[in-house]
Amino acid sequence: MYAVILRGGSRLSMGVLLLTFLLYAGGLASPLIPIDRLPQYWGLKAAEYLRRAELPSGWGWVRLVGFGDYLNYVGIVMLASLSVLCLLAIFPLLLRRKDTAFILIVLAEIAVLFLAASGLLVVGH
């Protein structure tokens, strides 16, 4: 089950990434930052880029998903979410088997992934 979801989800996510890139590169989805302005940001660190371009950090991208340069985040999030989906898929099997050790490991992995994605813990910059 895990492998089936991972394979199908990977293919779907890559398809979404390709489609959103083509929409952006083909000019069908207008970018928030015009392509001709990108070179002025290339040498900046991420925090400085966000500040100068007046862009949100963390989950702030969600409200900008209608722009071509943010539309590709949908495929990235889909790809990044696959681990949790796969773990949730095997969870009922672990419960039926009463495999306590793996149940605890899967719950811990899911909790860590959700905590990391939430942005509640900030480490480093």
Image (spheres, rainbow, N blue to C red):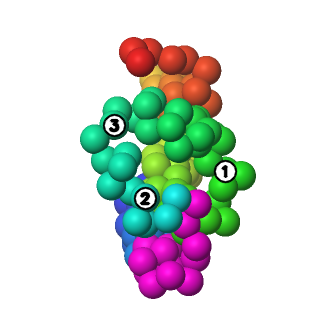
Residue 39 locus on image (x, y percent): 33, 55
The residue tagged with tag 1: helix, strand or loop? helix
The Cα–Cα distance between marks 1 and 3, rounded to whole angstroms, is 23 Å
At a point 37% along the width and 46% down the height, the residue shown is: 41
Q: Amino acid at mark 3?
A: Leu
What residue is shown with label 3? 44
Q: How many marks?
A: 3
At a point 40% along the width and 65% down the height, the residue shown is: 36
In the rendered image of this protein, does residue 59 appear above or below residue 31? above
| First along the sequence among labels 1 and 3 | 3
Is 58 colored magenta in this rendering? Answer: no
What residue is shown with label 1? 62
Q: Amino acid at mark 2?
A: Arg
Q: Quadrant of the C terminus?
A: top left
What residue is shown with label 2? 37
The residue tagged with tag 2: helix, strand or loop? helix
Q: Which residues are magenta?
A: 20-32
| First along the sequence among labels 2 and 1 | 2
Seen from the viewer's position, the closer of residues 9 and 19 is: 19
Seen from the viewer's position, the closer of residues 51 and 68 is: 51
The residue tagged with tag 3: helix, strand or loop? loop
Is 30 colored magenta in this rendering? Answer: yes
User: Pointer 3 and pointer 2: residues touching (CB < 8 Å)?
Assistant: no
Q: Is residue 93 visible?
A: no
- Crowd around label 1: few <14 · some 14–19 · many ≥20 (10 Å): few
